[in-house]
Image (tube, rainbow, N blue to C red):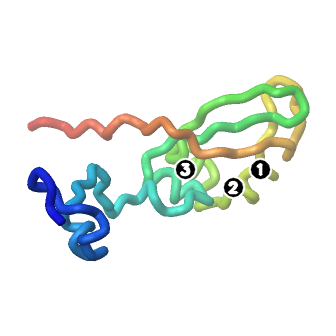
């Protein structure tokens, strides 16, 4: 039964109803959709990293590129935790690492 140009839901098959409905959601292939478990993953997704000291609550945001250059290799977050020392309480290896939801700015290209 069609009323005012719109088919009744009971008379529309599943496939037809999918075509009839409009969705604002679009699936995209994005590096940020992949799990972020290492410095390389965070750098590829261009996300900052947050560090929280479990002892004193001190926290900071860092660039994964700079950390990877300082470590001279890719580290997982578990490996990175063991190397971190809090700058406030000086506790070693007692930090949590989280990827930030804030993206880093695009690298600037040199215009010549």
Judged left or right of residue 34, residue 37 is right
User: In the rendered image, which residue does mark 2 sit on?
Assistant: 77
Label 1 Cα crowd, 10 Å radius (few <14 / some 14-19 / many 20+): some
Task: Say which residue label 3 marks.
Answer: 69
> Secondary structure under badge 1?
helix
User: Relative to 68, is 62 above or below?
Assistant: above
Q: CA distance from mark 1 to mark 3?
A: 16 Å
In the displayed structure image, the side of residue 15 where residue 42 appears, left or right:
right
| Residue 73: image location, x then y, percent | 59, 61
Callout 2–callout 1 Cβ contact below 8 Å: yes
Q: Which residue lies under the disc numbered 1?
A: 81
Task: Work out which quarter of the rendered image holds the N terminus and state it.
Answer: bottom left
Alpha-carbon distance for marks 2 and 3?
15 Å
Q: Can you give x and y, in whole percent of width and height, for residue 42 in the image?
A: 52, 52
Quadrant into which the C terminus falls: top left
Q: Residue at x 32, y 61 (%)?
A: 27
Tell me the SS state at disc 3: helix
Q: Residue drawn at (66%, 29%), measured in percent from left and top?
A: 60
Q: Which of the 4 quarters of the picture holds residue 35? A: bottom right
Labels 1 and 3: the sequence-earlier one: 3
Q: Tell me which numbered mark, 2 or 3, is placed earlier along the sequence.
A: 3
């Amino acid at each position: 039964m069609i009323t005012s140009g719109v088919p009744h839901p009971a008379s529309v098959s599943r496939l037809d109803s999918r075509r009839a409905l409009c969705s604002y959601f679009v699936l995209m292939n994005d590096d940020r959709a992949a799990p972020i478990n290492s410095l390389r993953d965070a750098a590829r997704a261009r996300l900052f990293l947050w560090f929280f000291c479990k002892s004193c609550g001190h926290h900071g945001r860092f660039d994964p590129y700079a950390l990877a250059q300082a470590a001279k290799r890719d580290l997982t977050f578990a490996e990175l935790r063991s190397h971190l020392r809090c700058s406030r309480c000086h506790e070693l290896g007692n930090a949590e690492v989280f990827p930030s939801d804030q993206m880093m700015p695009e690298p600037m290209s040199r215009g010549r």
